[in-house]
């Protein structure tokens, strides 16, 4: 199993929105960064777990856990000219962008704020706190995963 961190702006799609979806499952689409796409396309597997991270908000941080429930598949928003994620260079015959479906697992009682994560020595090497790292999908090591979970228990 791999572990991930997946960022979303809560005013666009929050963990509460995911909880309200049918079967608490939704497509994770609109990724338009090649490195994040490659993580999703080449490394994500059904059963992988990810921290759900609220970004670009008053208190950014980890708010819960989701599970990857599908293999990567073409992101249809890239082909929809009415979508803000439309990519006129993406070809349905050779899709440039992919999605996976995620399912809600757990919402934490309290947010684990980025400000706290940055202070913890065991998370110093976490992709999230690396200078210049703004990827919306990031790998998390098993050690980092368990260190974050210890903050919720």
Image (cartoon, rainbow, N blue to C red):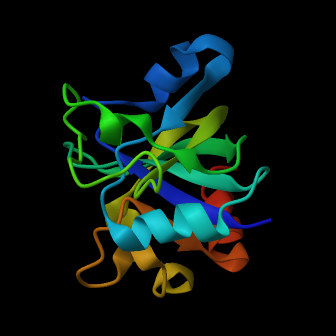
Q: Residue at x 44, y 53 (%)?
A: 95
Task: Using the image as rendered, state which of residue 136 and residue 99 is in the foreground.
Answer: 99
Residue 73, percent across and down? Answer: 59, 46
Q: Is residue 120 visible?
A: no
Give the quadrant of residue 22: top right
Give the quadrant of residue 85: top left
Task: Using the image as rendered, state which of residue 28 and residue 109 is in the foreground.
Answer: 28
Is the residue 22 above or below the residue 78 in the image? above
Is the residue 1 above or below the residue 12 in the image? below
Q: Residue at x 19, y 25 (%)?
A: 82
Total tally of numbered discs in the picture: 0
Task: Using the image as rendered, state which of residue 136 and residue 76 is in the foreground.
Answer: 76
Left or right position of 86 against 36: left
Q: Residue at x 79, y 50 (%)?
A: 47
Residue 124, percent across and down? Answer: 45, 85
Residue 14, percent across and down? Answer: 40, 30
Left or right position of 112 against 78: right
Q: Residue at x 26, y 85 (%)?
A: 131
Left or right position of 117 against 27: left
Residue 99, percent across and down? Answer: 51, 45
Q: Quadrant of the N terminus?
A: bottom right
Is the residue 135 above or below the residue 87 in the image? below
Give the quadrant of residue 139: bottom right
Is the residue 72 above or below the residue 120 in the image? above
Left or right position of 70 against 75: right
């Amino acid at each position: 199993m791999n572990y991930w961190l997946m960022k979303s702006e809560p005013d666009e799609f929050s963990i509460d929105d995911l909880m309200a979806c049918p079967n608490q499952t939704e497509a994770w689409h609109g990724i338009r960064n090649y490195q994040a796409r490659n993580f999703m396309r080449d490394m994500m597997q059904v059963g992988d777990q990810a921290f759900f991270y609220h970004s670009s908000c008053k208190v950014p941080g980890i708010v819960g856990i989701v599970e990857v429930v599908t293999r990567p598949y073409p992101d249809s928003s890239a082909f929809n000219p009415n979508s803000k994620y439309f990519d006129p260079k993406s070809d349905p015959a050779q899709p440039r962008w992919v999605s996976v479906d995620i399912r809600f697992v757990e919402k934490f009682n309290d947010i684990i704020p980025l400000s706290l994560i940055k202070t913890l020595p065991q998370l110093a090497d976490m992709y999230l706190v690396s200078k210049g790292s703004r990827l919306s999908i990031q790998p998390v090591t098993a050690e980092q995963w368990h260190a974050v979970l210890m903050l919720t228990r």
